Image (cartoon, grey):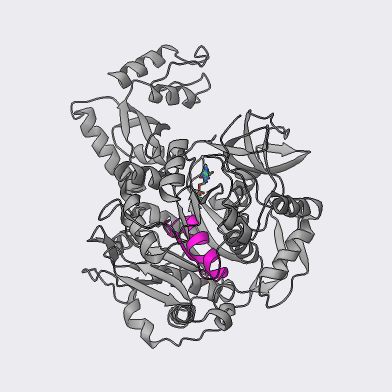
């Protein structure tokens, strides 16, 4: 596979932490030869331990791996306290609100704010080590304070993305048996207030008996309902809290947070991360992949509701002692130059976003970047979905001025941090390619039987050795954990972690991610399970059966295409467009607007095998308008294919 190669800028490479491919190979080789020694070295060098660990890796209960066994630490101490000697007056968080309001929060101020928050939770609300706290928050500094406050007192946070509906929020609250909810009245988007607290109120109407208190940060000061004895104003309580708070002594393997994500079947999974391994890799990848230096300003545009916001807005940057920018608004408001204006204004050095954002900013404002001085940029990152070569090139040239390495970082909620990515001072990059596994990460493209695929062939992207920041289990469902990740690929007799992604490796060893091979779709970098969307659509009273597939989309990566079979059609059934609208309302209610279907087609039946399995590949081809190449003779009713095609085209 011949592709153009882009080399790192020489001056940048000279000062980078990993300066060339020899240094990369040395590190990767070290990890291969002495895996535990490699991780032992970094854990000792990077983490400020309260008490040392006894063992680097315990594999005795695989795949429930344990790292840095017996070690004691506190993640908020790692992110805050240990920086106070060197960086107390350095900006930790630079916040820009939707309306252009700004706040610079130094490490000392952040430390104090987190301590006050931690004291509020611990002393006023009685939150203890191991309790679950759900955050349903906008992108405001208080969201970061809340996460770090939980880490400080040993509570397990579960951040739920603010775009999820009351139903989705309720499911997550119940699954985690949360004791406290932290939310905001709402926030601002495109200069208008929007609301979050009413969604919490609806979520709590049923089945959330575990919830004792709701803490509300007042951000937009819109009117909300306050329930006495349950709802408390952060703004009123915080001033009374002491700004010192003893950090809880945590074990390496105590849970740090849960983050729910979609799988190929059923309800979302509560991915559980642990303390030491997670924070170690968050910090190391910040240093290696973004090469963040003392005076740099780093900006990741993700939302804290996703793993990228956890690892690369809050934990990674702060553990590395960096300055992290937090942005409440959207990069296209008031125009498609907003992000570039911010890059100019804050002299951003590392910029990290999703391919969908790049495509949208390219489409809406191809020439916007020319209006701004983007010369501060050193490293550009992308994450969340495959990036296409045209978007890559625009990013490289128009934003990076042909100077900045694009780090196409492949990773997942489950991996905690980057796994496959270029190193900005070392890796010769091929466009739209995640390149090589990071040192210490044993990523391979395999067949189901564990044999490596031939160069150019599509295979399954697996990680063949445990790594420190890996998922520990699915909250409350260890069996599902085993089945979801360690059930599909076996190498040398041992089940290995399978990511759910397909990939291709070329003859130079470059890995290109081709996308999910399971029933997960990726819309604008948001991961959604087809099973979840189907379950929502089935709640519509007219729907008998439904199958959802992803359809390639120029802007969003994939769009959602639903084939629905109706119950007996009676007179109350109107136009297809009307039904589609109703179905989307149900989806918005059950999951959130992000899961609304772009296309909904009523069809007479679904292509099923004789054993009743829906042949989604056929539906994917129909959605794309492709010719059907699959063998349809094994279908229970092969004629259904032509009938569906007629409905879709008609
Ligand atoms: O399919 C891969 C895609 O995003 C999935 C993980 O989604 P999530 O857990 O929500 O985490 C997103 C942020 C890390 C992966 O299974 N993905 C992630 N990064 C890339 C990617 N696909 C292609 N290229 C990437 N760089």
Camera-side residue: 477 or 138? Answer: 138
Which quarter of the picture shows residue 282? Answer: bottom right
Quadrant of the frame with the N terminus: top right
Above or below for 602 versus 527: above
Q: Quarter-wise, where is residue 347 in the image?
A: bottom left
Q: Foreground residue, 343 or 143?
A: 343
Q: Quadrant of the C terminus?
A: top left
**Horizontally, is 210 left or right of 39 in the view?**
left
How many callouts does the rendering have?
A: 0
Measuring from the top left, give residue 178's x and y in whole percent.
Answer: 46, 65
Asked if residue 309 lies left or right of residue 473, the reply is left
Q: Is residue 435 above or below residue 105?
A: above
Q: Which residues are magenta?
A: 293-322
581 and 623: which one is in front?
Answer: 623
Any part of residue 226 in sight: yes
Q: Is residue 137 visible?
A: no
Q: For the point 52% across and 69% down, which residue is it?
A: 322
Position of residue 304 measured from the top left corner of the image (x, y, whole percent): 44, 60
Q: Is residue 306 magenta?
A: yes
Residue extending farthest to the front is 11
Give the x, y percent position of residue 121: 45, 77
Quadrant for residue 584, please give it: top left
Q: Residue at position x 44%, y 62% from top?
A: 348
Q: Is residue 529 above or below residue 649?
A: below
The vertical placement of 134 against 302, above or below, is below
- Determine if the magenta segment contains residue 365: no
- What residue lies at 38% left-to-right and 88% top-to-bottom? 240
In percent of width and height, residue 58 lies at 76, 59
């Amino acid at each position: 596979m011949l592709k153009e190669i882009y080399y790192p800028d020489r001056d940048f490479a000279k000062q980078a932490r990993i300066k060339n491919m020899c240094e990369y190979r040395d590190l990767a080789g070290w990890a291969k030869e002495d895996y535990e020694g490699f991780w032992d070295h970094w854990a000792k060098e990077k983490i400020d331990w309260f008490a040392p660990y006894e063992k680097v890796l315990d594999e005795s209960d695989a795949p429930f791996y344990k790292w840095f066994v017996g070690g004691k630490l506190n993640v908020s101490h790692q992110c805050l306290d240990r920086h106070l000697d060197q960086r107390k007056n350095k900006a930790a968080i630079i916040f820009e609100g939707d309306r252009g309001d700004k706040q610079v929060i130094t490490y000392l101020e952040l430390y104090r704010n987190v301590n006050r928050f931690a004291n509020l939770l611990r002393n006023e609300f009685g939150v203890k080590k191991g309790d679950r706290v759900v955050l349903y928050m906008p992108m405001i500094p208080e969201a970061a304070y809340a996460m770090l406050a939980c880490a400080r007192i040993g509570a397990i946070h579960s951040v739920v993305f603010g775009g999820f509906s009351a139903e989705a929020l309720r499911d997550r609250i119940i699954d985690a048996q949360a004791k406290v909810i932290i939310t905001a009245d709402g926030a601002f988007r495109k200069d208008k207030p929007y609301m979050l607290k009413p969604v919490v109120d609806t979520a709590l109407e049923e089945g959330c008996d575990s919830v004792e208190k709701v803490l509300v940060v007042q951000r937009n000061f819109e009117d909300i309902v306050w329930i006495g004895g349950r709802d408390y104003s952060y703004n009123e309580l915080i001033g009374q809290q002491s700004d010192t708070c003893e950090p809880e002594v945590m074990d390496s393997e105590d849970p740090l947070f849960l983050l729910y994500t979609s799988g190929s079947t059923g309800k979302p999974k509560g991915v559980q991360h642990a303390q030491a391994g997670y924070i170690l890799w968050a910090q190391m990848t910040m240093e290696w992949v973004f090469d963040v230096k003392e005076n740099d300003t780093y900006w990741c545009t993700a939302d804290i509701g996703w793993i990228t916001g956890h690892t690369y807005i809050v934990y990674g940057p702060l553990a590395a002692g960096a300055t992290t920018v937090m942005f409440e608004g959207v990069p296209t408001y008031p125009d498609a130059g907003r992000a570039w204006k911010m890059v100019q204004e804050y002299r951003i050095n590392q910029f990290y976003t999703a391919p969908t954002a790049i495509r949208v900013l390219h489409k809406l404002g191809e020439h916007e970047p020319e209006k701004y001085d983007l010369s501060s940029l050193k490293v550009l990152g992308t994450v969340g979905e495959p990036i296409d070569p045209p978007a890559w090139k625009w990013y490289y040239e128009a934003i990076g001025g042909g100077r900045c390495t694009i780090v196409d970082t492949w990773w997942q909620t489950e991996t905690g941090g980057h796994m496959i990515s270029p190193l900005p001072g070392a890796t010769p990059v091929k466009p739209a390619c995640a390149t090589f596994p990071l040192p210490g990460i044993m990523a391979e493209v395999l067949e189901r039987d564990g044999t490596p695929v031939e160069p150019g062939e599509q295979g399954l992207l697996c990680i063949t050795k445990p790594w420190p920041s890996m998922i520990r289990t699915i909250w409350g469902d260890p069996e599902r954990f085993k089945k979801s990740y360690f059930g599909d690929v076996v190498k040398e007799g041992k089940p290995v972690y399978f990511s759910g992604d397909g990939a291709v490796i070329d003859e130079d060893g470059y890995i290109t991610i081709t996308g999910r091979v399971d029933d997960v779709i990726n819309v604008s970098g948001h991961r959604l399970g087809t099973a979840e969307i189907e379950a929502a659509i089935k709640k519509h009273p007219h729907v008998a059966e439904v199958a959802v597939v992803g359809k390639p989309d120029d802007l969003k990566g994939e769009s959602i295409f639903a084939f629905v079979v109706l119950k007996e059609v009676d007179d109350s059934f109107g136009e297809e467009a009307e039904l589609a609208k109703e179905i989307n309302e149900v989806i918005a209610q059950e999951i959130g607007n992000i899961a609304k279907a772009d296309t909904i087609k009523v069809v007479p039946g679904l292509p099923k095998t004789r054993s009743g399995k829906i042949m989604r590949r056929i539906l994917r081809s129909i959605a794309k308008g492709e010719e059907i190449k699959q063998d349809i003779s094994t279908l229970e009713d092969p004629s259904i294919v032509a009938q569906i095609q007629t409905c879709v085209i008609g």
